[in-house]
Image (cartoon, rainbow, N blue to C red):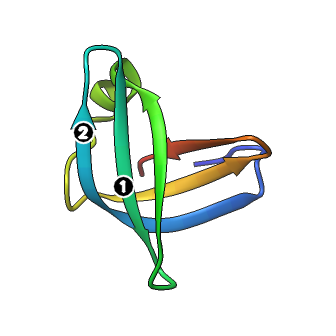
Amino acid sequence: MKISARNKLKGKVEAVDSGMVMAKIKIKIENPDVITAIITKEAADDLGIKEGDKVIAIVKSTEVMVGKE
């Protein structure tokens, strides 16, 4: 996956909490820390994100986006 953002953290999804509009994705990154990304439910559904998936947290100044390889 090629993108312009340079701040990428590889990790594994620990939990997915889907609401009516937004989805909260907890990602365990390689340093034993966890970050949380709030993305739209549509984006979470489009990516097919579920617990155990390997993902990349992409940090863009004030936001955290999620990408799946």
User: From the viewer's perspective, is 63 left or right of 68?
Assistant: right
Query: What residue is shown at x 36% (from left), y 55% (from top)?
Result: 26
Which residue of the protein is positioned furthest toward the top in this rendering?
Answer: 20
Instruction: Tell me the crowding category of disc 1: few under 14, some 14 to 19, or many 20 or more residues within 10 angstroms, Cα based.
Output: some
Position in image of residue 65 (x %, y %): 57, 41
Instruction: Tell me the crowding category of disc 2: few under 14, some 14 to 19, or many 20 or more residues within 10 angstroms, Cα based.
Output: few
Position in image of residue 31 (x %, y %): 51, 84
Position in image of residue 18 (x %, y %): 24, 30
User: From the viewer's perspective, is 20 left or right of 31?
Assistant: left
User: From the viewer's perspective, is 11 left or right of 65?
Assistant: left
**Dot 2: what SS?**
strand
Considering depth in this image, is 16 or 43 the residue closer to the camera? 16
Specify which label sits upstream in the sequence, 2 or 1. Answer: 2
Which residue of the protein is positioned furthest toward the left in this rendering?
Answer: 51
> Where residue 17 is drawn, which disc sits there?
2
In the picture shown, does residue 10 fall above or below 51?
Answer: below
Total residue callouts: 2
In the picture shown, does residue 47 fall above or below 68?
Answer: above
> Where residue 48 is drawn, which disc sits there?
none
> Where residue 26 is drawn, which disc sits there?
1
- Residue type at mark 2: give it: Asp
- Residue type at mark 1: give it: Lys
Q: Are marks 2 and 1 in contact (CB under 8 Å)?
A: yes
In the picture shown, does residue 22 fall above or below 26?
Answer: above
Position in image of residue 66 (x %, y %): 50, 44
Q: Label 2 to label 1, Cα distance in Å?
A: 9 Å
Query: What residue is shown at x 68% (from left), y 51% (from top)?
Result: 59
**Dot 1: what SS?**
strand
Quarter-of-image position of residue 14: bottom left
